[in-house]
Every structure is written in structure tokens, then in C-alpha cells.
Amino acid sequence: MKKWQFWLGVLISIFFIWISLRGLRLGEFWEVVKNANYWWILPGIAVYFVGVWVRAWRWHYLLKPIKEIPTKTMFPVTTIGYMGNNIYPARAGEVLRAVILKRREGVPVSASLATIIVERIFDGVVMLAFVFINLPELAKLTSASGFVGNIQQLALYGTGAFVAALVIFLLAAMFPLLTAKIGQWFIDRFLPARLHEKVSGIMHKFLDGLASLRSPLNILMVFVTSVIIWLFETMKYWFVMHAFNFDVSFFALMLMNGIVNLATTIPSAPGYIGTFDAPGIAVLTAYGVDQATAAGYTLTLHAALWLPITLLGAYYLAKEGIKWSDSLRAEAE
């Protein structure tokens, strides 16, 4: 990872941390954190890992046309990917899990990455759905502020981007020969001749990774599975909420989940520092939660989302006997 990209992410994180914590009274914040009932985090972690298992099943389902791999095999690789996203910049965990799957099962990296991008597109669509479902309620609470307008604008731009990406991928999946022909035209005209064969091979393997999208039933299955995954994650938000002295509806937590996960697509320091926390605190304060409680809850939730999956991913990576060595870094690049 280039140093300037890393430091840019750090600066963005610092900016978002400043936004989220400005005006916070540390004494009140400490009282909130000190008096929280942290036992509620345990059932939250449990339902979260059920969602991770469903995510592994979805990846297994997307890879079926390429190779049948059991979900129990995909689960450790999925957790390693989470760990990579949490401790390395630029969502390096996505590439890391594709590389590890190639080492374990021989699936081409480009084909794995195609399925991973499909996952992320469907995740984005579901997150936007969570936002749109709950915008009217939030607008009633904060109609006098510019906060809702900013969210609506973000949702509209995000919808355009994700829907456009989804349409492109669906067309590429349904018309692979035409897509390959168009791709080859660009390769032949804009790349050096020495790269034609290599890039063409990568393109064809990438298109193989989209094979699961050629069936409307498969598309529906992936979408429904994506909704289930994010509902399980929202359940974790709900359980952790009970550790603190406030109460908002499950739909409000769906909105928070959608907004914070869309915000984490902004480049930041590893672990989505700041980009997760600032919008989460803002949503809760819009619902009338005081800043100290909103900050205590959001930071605790962030830690509960980050730490368990990172530790489990690190365990599985060590169990595989794989280290983030120069050879693995070169393969990922």
C-alpha cells in the first residue's frame, strides 16, 4: 500500500473523529461507559457470527458455478477477509481472502474477486434500502436540520452508483460472449501487446465468477441472503443497545446500520476509524439520544464489531500457517 494513500486515510479518520467527538463532555461520557451492562454484548456477538456464517454460505453459493466448496471451508476464509479489512488499509482483506482461496482450493483470484465485488454491490443495495425505508421517520425528527438532506443526497448518489454497477454486472453475466468481445477490443487497443494474453485470461476468469448471476432465481437468492446478513448485524446493534440507558426502534438501528456502512466506503485508517463512529453518533443524536450516550454506545459497538472477528480471523490465518509475508503481499498486489 502506498504511503500517501495510508496517510490520507489517517487524515480522513482524524477529521471524522473530530466531527464525532467535538463538544463531548468527557465526564458524562465516562459515566455512560462505566455504567454500561456489557453482558449484552455476548448475545450480540453470537448473532453477528451467525450472520458471518450466512455470508460464507452466500460466497459458497456465488462460487458454485466455478467450484463446489462447503460453507464450513468458506467460513474461516471469510473471517480472514474480515480481519484483513480491519487491520490493513483499502479493504485489503477482500484480496487476501481471494488469494487464500486460490491457495486452498485452486479458484482463480480474478474469479473470486468477481464474486466478492458482486457481494459488495448487493450489500450496498441492501444498505441503501435500510436508509430509504427509514428516511421519512428521521425527517419528522430532524426536519429543521440539514442532517436529513445530507443523508438523502448521499442515498441518491449511492443509489445511482450501486444500481449502475449492478446493471453492468448483470449484463456482463447474461451476455458473457459479447462482454468478452468488447473487453478484448479495449485490451487490443489500449494495452501493450505483451499484456494482451495475460489480461485477456484474467478477464475471462473474472466473467466466469459472474456465472451465478445468469439465473433470476440465483439473483433473488443472493439478494434475500444479503438482507438476512444485514438483519443479523442489526440484531447485534439491538443487543448492544440494551447495555446502555436509551431505547430506539429496530428500524432506527437499521437506518444507523445502513448509514455507517455506506460511510465506511470512504477511505480511512484501517478499521474504519471515524467513518463508522461519526455518522453513528449523528443518527442517534437525531433520534434524541444525548451525545455522551450516543458516543459511548457507538464506540462500544464499533469495538464489539471489530475485535471478535479480527481475533477469529487471526486465529484461522495462523492455523493456515500463512503470514502476511513479502510473497503473499506480492501475490495480493
Image (cartoon, helix red, strand yellow):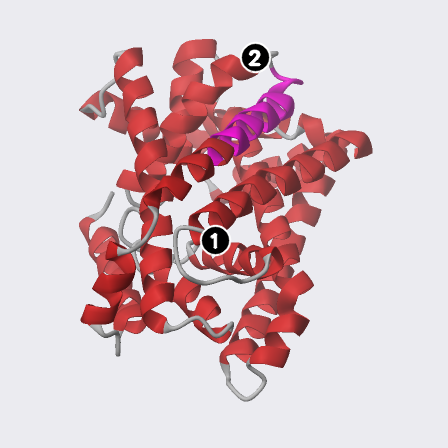
Callout 2 secondary element: loop
| In-front residue for pair 32/284 | 32
At horizontal 21% and vertical 62% (from top left) the residue drawn is 30
What type is the residue that disc 2 sits on?
Ile
**Which mark, residue 136?**
none
Mark 2 against mark 1, which lies toward the viewer? 1
Q: Residue at x 33, y 25 (%)?
A: 312
Compared to 178, does 296 lie above or below? below
Q: Residue at left 29%, top 61%?
A: 32
Q: CA distance from mark 2 to mark 1?
A: 28 Å
Q: Is residue 278 left or right of residue 51?
A: left
| Residue placed most toward the observer, 329 or 285 | 285
Q: Amino acid at mark 1?
A: Asn
Task: Say which label, 2 or 1, has the lower sequence index.
Answer: 2
Region rendered in magenta? 48-66
Q: Is 307 situated above or below 245?
A: above
Residue indicated by mark 2 = 69
- In the image, residue 102 above or below residue 260: above
Q: For the N terminus, which image quadrant?
A: top left
- Say few, some or many: other residues with alpha carbon within 10 Å of mark 2 (under 14 / 14 to 19 / 20 or more): some
Residue at which label 1 appears? 261
